[in-house]
Amino acid sequence: MDISKKDKIHTLLKGIETGDPAAASVVNENKYIQHNPLTPTGNIGLAELFKRLSQTSPQVDIVRIFEDGDFVFAHTNYDFNVLEIGFEVFRFEDGLAVEHWDNLQLKPEHPNQSGHTMIDGPTEATDHDQTEANRAFINTYVKEILIESELEKLNHFVDTDYTEHNPERADGLMSLLESFRNNSENKRYDTLHRVLAEGSFVLSIGEGSLDGVHTSFYDLFRLSSDRKIVEHWDTIDMIPPRTEWKNNNGKF
């Protein structure tokens, strides 16, 4: 029986707990491209990373995992001495993972002011027949709202009672609008690199700056059947300076 791409990535990520280098066998070592700037590229680098992390008794919880053609994207909860929330993205060729991107953020100690953590909420995609329409919708949202700041259009995209998982925000359209206005000077989206989707869940991968620091923004949206954003999760990751990179592949 063929093993699904999702199951292969589940095996790979859980290998972080055990340090078993065999978990990296779902990776094509001859083609593997690593986009985490602090991880060496190739299968050997991945096996070394697993071995090192396993010595800290890590815990890996895969909260959500989705598939979009040759891509698998997962929403993860990590305990590597520090608690982190992450998004992991893998590209497959001929049944093996050949490329990897991620975005990690420290997990806050407490829920946000609406009582939500960075990972709670629905985990299963619905409306699979709407995948492409939802992808196009979020593509437009990111460009018009996050990049161009056309905030007068926000209610066309976001449900009035939407649920927010960002640690610094609260639920609701008006809270989101206020957050955008208050942070317009220090948080900036410049480029949308990729939009991945499975049904009602859509992940956008963007680049910009936060407080003047080069930053990667991963935003996961859940859409309603009538195509409104009803829920949002994200991670914000500062991109290290070029002198600290361990590969030459770039964050994106």
Image (cartoon, rainbow, N blue to C red):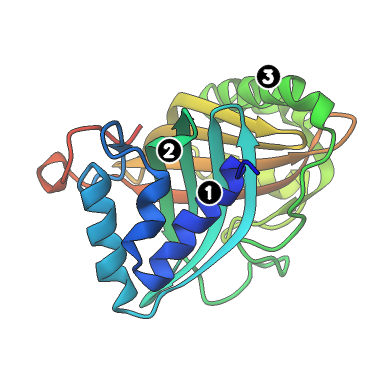
In the image, which is nearer the foreground, mark 2 or mark 3? 2
Relative image position of residue 218 (x, y in whole percent): 50, 42
Q: Are marks 3 and 1 in contact (CB under 8 Å)?
A: no
At x 28%, y 40%, the residue is: 29
Q: Are marks 1 and 2 in contact (CB under 8 Å)?
A: yes
Report the quarter where the N terminus lies: top right
Image position of 234 with respect to 121: above or below: above
| Classed neighbour count for the residue bearing mark 3: other residues with Cα under 10 Å, few (<14), some (14–19), many (≥20) | few
Q: Amino acid at mark 3?
A: Ala
Residue highlighted by disc 1: 8
Q: Residue furthest right?
A: 226
> Tag 3's secondary structure?
helix
| Classed neighbour count for the residue bearing mark 1: other residues with Cα under 10 Å, few (<14), some (14–19), many (≥20) | some
Q: Amino acid at mark 1?
A: Lys
In the image, which is nearer the foreground, mark 3 or mark 1? 1
> Tag 1's secondary structure?
helix
> Tag 2's secondary structure?
strand
Relative image position of residue 127 (x, y in whole percent): 85, 33
Compute the Cα span from label 3 to label 1: 28 Å
At x 47%, y 47%, the residue is: 88
Question: What label does residue 97 carry, if any?
Answer: 2
Compute the Cα span from label 2 to label 3: 26 Å
At x 57%, y 41%, the residue is: 5
The answer to whether any part of residue 109 appears in the image is yes
Question: What label does residue 136 carry, if any?
Answer: 3
Question: What label does residue 60 carry, if any?
Answer: none
Q: Nearer the viewer, residue 147 or 42?
A: 42
